[in-house]
Every structure is written in structure tokens, then in C-alpha cells.
Image (cartoon, grey):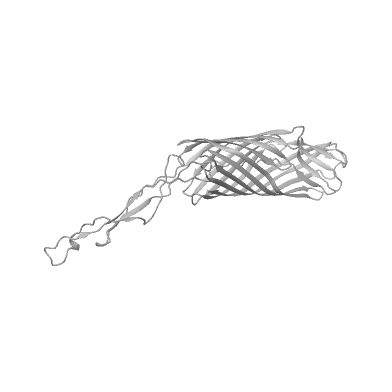
Amino acid sequence: MRKQLSLFVLAVAAFGISPVMAATNSGMRGASSADLTGAPGVRSQAKVDYEKYETRSSTKTYAVKDDKNIYYTQPASRGDMYKNAGTSSSTAAMRTTRTETAYREAKRKYFLAHPFFQPLEGKFGSITDVAYTTNSYDMSINTFVPGSMSDTKAAWDMSQISVKEDLSYGITDKFTILGMVRYASTDYTWDWSVAPDDTMKDSGVDIWGLGTQWRFVDNAEWIGLISGYYQHQDKISDNFIVDLKAGYKVARSTIYGLARGWLVNLDGQTHGNRIYDPVSGSSTLILYGSDKSSLSFLEAGIGLFSVLDEDWTLNLEGVLGSYSWHSQGSIKGAIGWQPGNSFALNLYAKTAIYDSMNDKQLGFYGINAGDPTWTHMGIANISNYSETSFGLQAIFLF
């Protein structure tokens, strides 16, 4: 008998585009003075006025324009080496000096990989996220009806490649509208210890959503935003999400906290991992929960965004979450590269370091062909839970 799997995934992808009011130095600007009609100039170097990279909104940055804007001044008097030889009454000649000066030119740089990035009025922000995600655990059904199963042990594996597009538009400098859509291709596998492996592949547009975001504070020390949006997950649920972030700016870094809440309205009242056999029409189900048409998820965490260099950034984040049938602790790290003001690349990795699915006992149910009644068949023990994502974001501001 070949089984086929249908997974009820409640993958909640927070897609909020968030703002940064950060500034960084990009150098200094130089100018020089010379009189090209006189003798050769003497080049002297001006002192560089250079400040550390900062992310406070009150700081400024300074641009460099090398060898631009040459100004001419009246040459100073020449020394004896420039006097006419043999002429005692000659008038003192003039000599020329060339100097360079440095001056400040205010220029602001918005870091697009900042967790508070948000486009200003009339601007669009785009984040294209290409990710690879894996999820696995071991299952052992140690209490079951004799004769009901030919194999009681399996390893579950899910691998997914997704492309998600987040688009935002600044209605004002503080208020933004959001939209997102995701395409995913997912492979599911039950690796049974005795029976042949069962696999299933699913692909298509599985998530889309709309929302708004408000940056309610941004000054020299504090930054904060709140967003709310609706998100639809195909054939699974409708989600209503509120996302709150607040950060404190310290020199080159922003330390922030976050809190998120979901109201998940399920398409049905039963959620879990279901195994379906299209030949016989029978099904088996590892039950996460039942008799509930809606669920609530909560997350809270702390993060650090820091400017490493003029073009490089670092983002670290730790999150604890409660997702109805299980809880999880995860960490995330990202390295960003932004050579200019309108484009950035952000490479990230996220992994679960704790999950209560380990050692959890879940009900195992079966249903026969033509019989709509689910029958309790045993208890499934879950162990070795793992969940990891790697991704690359291309971020644009236009």
C-alpha cells in the first residue's frame, strides 16, 4: 500500500517592511587652490574630518568628491630662488601654493536591511526573498491497535524552496501600505523503517497578504513601528497579525524588542499531519489539535542591528514563540551589503534551538475508505525535531 501525505502547515511568514532612520559617514570632500599662470604649486594635505559610523537619526554623513572644483587664488610672493639672475633691481616674483581643504556635506544613508526599514513618502520598497527551509523529526508509534499497521516508525522530512515578494509604498513619511505574495515548491517524505518511503510534492502560490504600517516614533534615541495585516494561506487558514517593534539607538547600533500576535482562522477544525492513500481511500492522521476553528500564536524577542562598515551591516535576533500545539525558541543572523542608497543584499540563516515537539505524545488516528469516522489507533512519540532556513534578500528602494 502506498501512502500519500498532505501536510497542514501553519507557516506564518511575517512580511512587514520596516523603517530605518540611520546615518553613516561615507567620507569627506576635498578641494584645492592653485594659480596655473605662476610657478609650480606646492601640494599640502589638509586634515581629514572623519566621524565614526552611527545610526542615530541626528547624525550626518559626509561625501567625497576627489579632485573636483579647483579654485584659484592670488599667488603669494616668491622667494629668492625665483628672482631673475643678475638683475639687482628686479621686482620680487611671486610663487604659487596649492592647498587642499575639507568640508562637510550632509548626506543621509538609509540601511535597507535594517529591521525598521520603511520607504518615505512617495517611495517604494521591495524585498525579494529566496529561501530554502527544512523541517524534520522522528516518529514512533509505540501504542497502537494490533494488526492495524505494518510499520510503526518513520522519519518525517520537509524541504522547501520559496520566493517571497514584499512590496511597500510610503503614503507619508510615517505611514506605509504593505503587500506580499509567496510561491513555494515543497517536498514531503515519510521515510518508513520497513515500508517503502511515501512522498508528495506541492507547488504554487501559497501565501498572500495586505497590510499597513505606522512608524510612530523616530528621534535621536528611539525608533518604533506597529503594523497590522491580513494573510491568507491557501487551503489552510486566514491570519490576522499585529507586529510591534521598538528600538533604542546606541552609537552604531540599534537594540530592539519585538512582539507579534496571530489570530489564525482554520479552514476546518482539525489540524495535523495527514497521510492519505489514494488507492484504498484510507487516511491516517497525527493530530495537533481538534474542535477548534481558530488558534492564537504569540512571539516575543530581542534583536541587535549594527553598522560594521560603510557598506556592511549585522543583524542578530532571538525569538520565543507559542504556537498553540508547540512552543519554540529560535535564533537568526544576517549579514547585509549595501553599496549605495537604493540596493542591498541580505544573507540570513535561522534555526530552532528549542522546540517542545521533542518528546511530545500526539494522537494517531485512522479512517477507512467510505467511512467518515476517525478511529483512534495509538500514540505517536515525536523526537529529534529540527527546523532551519537559509535565505538571500534583494532589497530595493525606488
The residue drawn where x is 68% and y is 40% is 232
**In front of the other: 265 or 246:** 265
Q: Is residue 206 visible?
A: yes
Q: Is residue 293 above or below residue 93?
A: above
Q: Residue furthest left?
A: 89
Query: Where does residue 216 sit, x and y in percent of width and height?
Result: 52, 34
**In front of the other: 287 or 14:** 14
**In front of the other: 143 or 291:** 291
Query: Where does residue 388 sit, x and y in percent of width and height?
Result: 65, 45
**In front of the other: 79 or 240:** 240
How many discs mark residues in the rendered view?
Answer: 0
The residue drawn where x is 88% and y is 41% is 370
Tell me: 346 left or right of 277. Answer: left
Query: Where does residue 4 sit, x and y in percent of width and height?
Result: 80, 47
Tell me: 21 left or right of 213. Answer: left
Tell me: 189 left or right of 45. Answer: right
Q: Is residue 44 visible?
A: no
The residue drawn where x is 74% and y is 45% is 156
